[in-house]
Amino acid sequence: MTASKIYEPVTPNSDEIKIAQESSRTLSRFLKKNLKVQIAETKEIVELPVSAVRLLVDLLANMAKGNAVTLIPIHAELTTQQAADLIGISRPFLIKLLEDGEIDFHMVGTHRRIYFQDLRNYMDKNKKAREEALDDLAAQAQDLDMGY
């Protein structure tokens, strides 16, 4: 999968939202087993592994809410702009994080590339640090009897 194909969100229209609502409800009943699906036009039967059914239900549930969705493989290589867009920061700030060693990256010629998994690792680490800081603040508020 090329970098240009990785980060192309699909935004559902109103008809697709309705179909996604119905489909996600129907498929959610089959989250615990492989699923055989018959293609109406060809009568062909396709078997989906349970993990793909879960992923499909999650994708449809998000589309049902009108959310744009995208699928990014764990080993996808992202450009710095794609990575910055994905986590909602500016490209210059992302470059600073890369140069400070906060996020792993590699060079392809003269261009920086970030594996999606490395970006996920940074996001998970960042989320954990935020949660710990909030827990500390809540504990301090309790210690100071601030009424929370």
Image (spheres, rainbow, N blue to C red):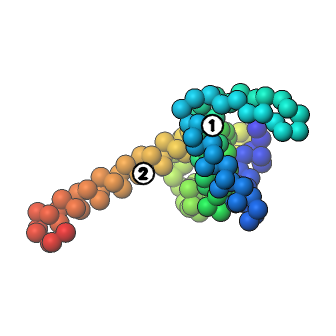
Q: Is residue 78 visible?
A: no
**Earlier along the polypeptide chain: callout 2 or callout 1?**
1
Query: Residue visible at 66% across and 53% down?
Result: 22
Q: Which residue is mark 1?
A: 53
Residue that lies at the very extreme toward the right in this rendered image? 42
The image quadrant where one finds the C terminus is bottom left
129 vs 13: above or below: above
Label 2 to label 1: alpha-carbon separation: 30 Å
Q: How many C-alpha atoms fall within 10 Å of the one at disc 2: few (<14), some, or many (≥20)?
A: few
Residue that lies at the very extreme toward the bottom in this rendered image? 146
Residue 148 in the figure: left or right of residue 70: left
118 vs 69: above or below: above
58 and 41: which is toward the camera: 41
- The amino acid on which the numbered mark 1 sits, given as a three-letter code, is Val
What x and y, as percent, mark residue 116? 60, 42
**For the residues carrying marks 2 and 1, which lies nearer the camera in this image?**
1
Q: Is residue 143 visible?
A: yes
What x and y, as percent, mark residue 16? 74, 58
Element at label 1:
helix
Q: Which residue is mark 2?
A: 126
34 vs 78: above or below: above
The image quadrant where one finds the N terminus is top right
- The amino acid on which the numbered mark 2 sits, given as a three-letter code, is Asn
Q: How many C-alpha atoms fall within 10 Å of the one at disc 1: few (<14), some, or many (≥20)?
A: many
